[in-house]
Amino acid sequence: MTRKAPAEDPGDARLRVGPPKEYAAGIPAVTSSLRHAGEQMGARRSLLTLLQVNQKGGFDCPGCAWPEPEHRHRAEFCENGAKAVAEEATLRRVTPDFFAEHTLDDLLPRGDYWLGQQGRLTHPMYRPAGSDRYQPISWDDAFAVIARELTALAHPGQAAFYTSGRASNEAAFVYQLFVRMLGTNNLPDCSNLCHESSGSALTETIGIGKGSVRLDDLHEADLILVVGQNPGTNHPRMLSALEQAKRRGARIIAVNPLPEAGLLRFKNPQRPSGLLGGGTRLADQFLPIRLGGDQALFQAFNRMLLEAEDEAPGTCLDTSFIDRYTHGFEEFAEQARKASWDDILEATGLPEEEIRAAFRQVLAADKVVVCWAMGLTQHRHSVPTIRDVVNFLLLRGNIGRPGAGLCPVRGHSNVQGDRTMGIYEKPDGAFLDALGAEFAFTPPRQHGHDAVETIRAMRDGDVRVFVALGGNFVAAAPDTELTERALRNCRLTVQISTKLNRSHVIAGERSLILPCLGRTEADEGPSGPQLVTVEDSMGMVHLSRGRLAPASEHLLSEVAIICRMARATLDETGPQVPWEDFEADYDRIRDRIERVIPGFGDFNTRVRRPGGFALPHPPRDERRFTTATGLANFTVNPLEWPHVPPGRLLLQTLRSHDQYNTTIYGLDDRYRGVRQGRRVLFLHPDDLTERGLAEGDLVDIVSEYGDGVERRARAFRAVPYPTPRGCCAAYFPETNVLVPLDSTAAVSNTPTSKSVVVRLEPASADTQPRA
Ligand SMILES: Nc1nc2c(c(=O)[nH]1)N[C@H]1C(S)=C(S)[C@@H](COP(=O)(O)OP(=O)(O)OC[C@H]3O[C@@H](n4cnc5c(=O)[nH]c(N)nc54)[C@H](O)[C@@H]3O)O[C@H]1N2
Ligand SMILES: Nc1nc2c(c(=O)[nH]1)N[C@H]1C(S)=C(S)[C@@H](COP(=O)(O)OP(=O)(O)OC[C@H]3O[C@@H](n4cnc5c(=O)[nH]c(N)nc54)[C@H](O)[C@@H]3O)O[C@H]1N2
Ligand SMILES: [Mo]
């Protein structure tokens, strides 16, 4: 089960590696944004477009889910936001001529970078069974194909409907409505691969699967822990918030196996002094933890908090908060006191003095925020790890008061909103009741497939039709070889997309590409310009309005595509939904959202106010915890950490500075010192020499899961890098081939993309990349 290094990954022969950077942003960030934008859009369009990003009345940046501050800069975007916009607003086009020239076999060996660089999709395209190429199809015929395949299924559970987190609230709401009227909860989404562990842990412990802080809380915190997150690349605007907190005297502790530039120092491109001066030092302390060691670190903090309280009762814990608002303290405390220092030191790989020094900062801080992302969520024991983070904050009453709280930093710009809209394979009963009452039907109760279960079901022939609202499922999902077979096993795959990607190439027996408007583009409906809404990482809902002319006159909006798909498919004699009205005027969709989903009262009015509105968050707003106990739950979590057999390494798969998930913007990873190549493996210099390897040697990375399947990623250049012994890192999607489908986090079922046991082998001669 192997795959050759794609010949299209052009630069690897030109790969250059220098020392990693010690600061993020600054002038190189400004020049890089302008260069990318200029290449894709030309100078004039770049300027006009970029000035609308995240402005009131403009469009929401399609980059990340970081919130907009109350007082916006003229340029409220970042280098990577600019790249995300340029990628969508590009002037390059993938027309029917392109598909006439390129058969699937021709497209198959092309890399993600090449595919994405071809430009925007312009026409609906269909590849019938037995054909090796896409041909143009009318929209009506495309919907007829979908309706035919969906209605021919033995039961609705044989279809699955994926969502990537860029879809607007309005698109997500009509999509899940259509899917549930069809009769299934098979609504896997990118969250299943992303922050599901956060949602699982938070729902159990505080009653809501969302973070409990607002932007101002970050500004007001005394101590911010940034754990398992690389904000300099993935949430660059977060650096401004960290900078502001620092200027008010906050301390920052970064916990990460890699010394990410954005955690160390920030030169704010929005302030002239920031561009030219030495920048702001961000992390006061950097803890280079081993992969998967975070639960041990928080257990150490928890044990020391309890001990500090024992030594001087009434001085450390917030006992009145614990008494009044929490459940399970006694059992938790009994277990937490027993945390073993030997285990803690082994799991974290950190010296005890370092942990104790960090703890002194914890003790000195009244208000603490913990921020995290994929470094915490993509491990086997992610859910218990995040539960221990919750325990940590509960001990000192750090939830539900200003300047403190839980901050899972979301990925896709509307991934949180999509979940609020009901994109979830395990919906709760109250939501289904409200949906059924509003639209006079009986929604299915049986839970549907998440992303991993969908892959298994397609592999096994239990899911026959796969529809994707955005994203690039085949490249984003684990176990590439298996996922490819699974998709090819479908009768029909449908991709609603803006840009060409691998999921159009690795497709079912027959496949459709339905090209849609992007967020930057004007959506002109019969009743005037249509606006959509999104929810950011902190539960703020606001409008997004694109203004650019659409990439092609044949595009439809996501809402229009879904409404027409529903009309073509659903039984005319069943309950009536005004799909045409929804498509014509998104206010009508928002009216329904308001009636089904709590917190959206007066939606159409409130969302038109500048800055939008905040959704209710009971723990944050009133220290109300809607859990099974009615209180915030302390939990007892046996300590876990990855055990790596001798001679093996633990691999994390992560993002470079030049990509957006599976979209590759370029071949540099500026902050980590990499130029012109992506097939690099970062590892400790001693792990390199111990294997008789030298810097720049080519190695194959072989995953060891013990299920008899060989998973091999070929021809990576070894790069000595400051990361703990035994740990290594390489970029996804190239390394997804190594992540076993069955290796997932307990409870959340998220693939363990940050914890893959691997061995290295010298690259076989036939796979040396060509110059
Ligand atoms: N430009 C850009 N922006 C993006 C994205 C993008 O691809 N490009 N993707 C978006 C999406 S969908 C998401 S989910 C977010 C992702 O945002 P991140 O989570 O920042 O993304 P990753 O690159 O996966 O980085 C994981 C970080 O966690 C660290 N880490 C890995 N394992 C561990 C561990 O066990 N413990 C600790 N303490 N640290 C660990 C890694 O060294 C790395 O710094 O970004 C969003 N924003
Ligand atoms: N090994 C490994 N795998 C991972 C991760 C990891 O850290 N390691 N991270 C995981 C995470 S956190 C996530 S969120 C997933 C991401 O998984 P996905 O969300 O499925 O992937 P993306 O690469 O973000 O999707 C890019 C595609 O979306 C389409 N697109 C872009 N904008 C729009 C739009 O406005 N509308 C529509 N309809 N389509 C659009 C374009 O065609 C583009 O090619 O990947 C996961 N996979
Ligand atoms: Mo994500």
Image (cartoon, rainbow, N blue to C red):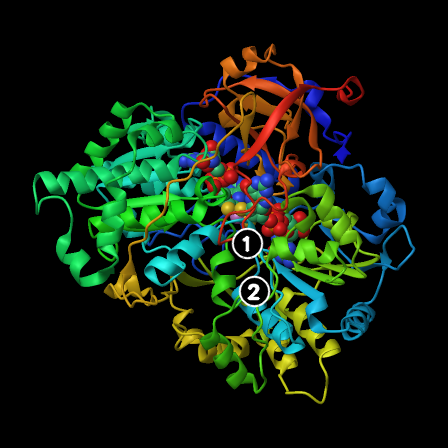
Name the residue: 8% across, 47% down: 314
Q: Amino acid at mark 2?
A: Glu
Lower sequence index among marks 2 and 1: 1
Question: Answer yes or no: do the residues labelled 2 and 1 have beta carbons within 8 Å?
Answer: yes
Q: Is mark 2 within 8 Å of ligand 2?
A: no
Residue designated by label 1: 192
Is residue 73 among the parts visible in the rendering?
A: no
Residue 513 numbered mark, or none: none
Image coordinates of residue 586 in percent, x first then y, are 55, 74
Q: As shown in the figure, which amino acid type bears the numbered disc 1?
A: Asn
Within-10-Å neighbours for mark 1: few <14, some 14–19, many 20+:
many
Quarter of image, res 467: bottom right
**If the image is split into quadrants, where does the C terminus sit?**
top right
Q: Using the numbered discs, state the Cα–Cα distance from disc 2 to disc 1 in whole angstroms.
A: 10 Å
| Circle 2 crowding by C-alpha within 10 Å: few under 14, some 14–19, many from 20 | many
Residue 448, percent across and down? Answer: 60, 66
Front residue of 719/579: it is 719
Q: Which residue is mark 2?
A: 425
Q: Is residue 395 left or right of residue 120?
A: left
Between 72 and 383, the residue placed more toward the observer is 383
Q: Quadrant of residue 707?
A: top right
| Quadrant including the N terminus | top right
Q: Outermost residue, right direction?
A: 130
Say above or below: 624 vs 55: below
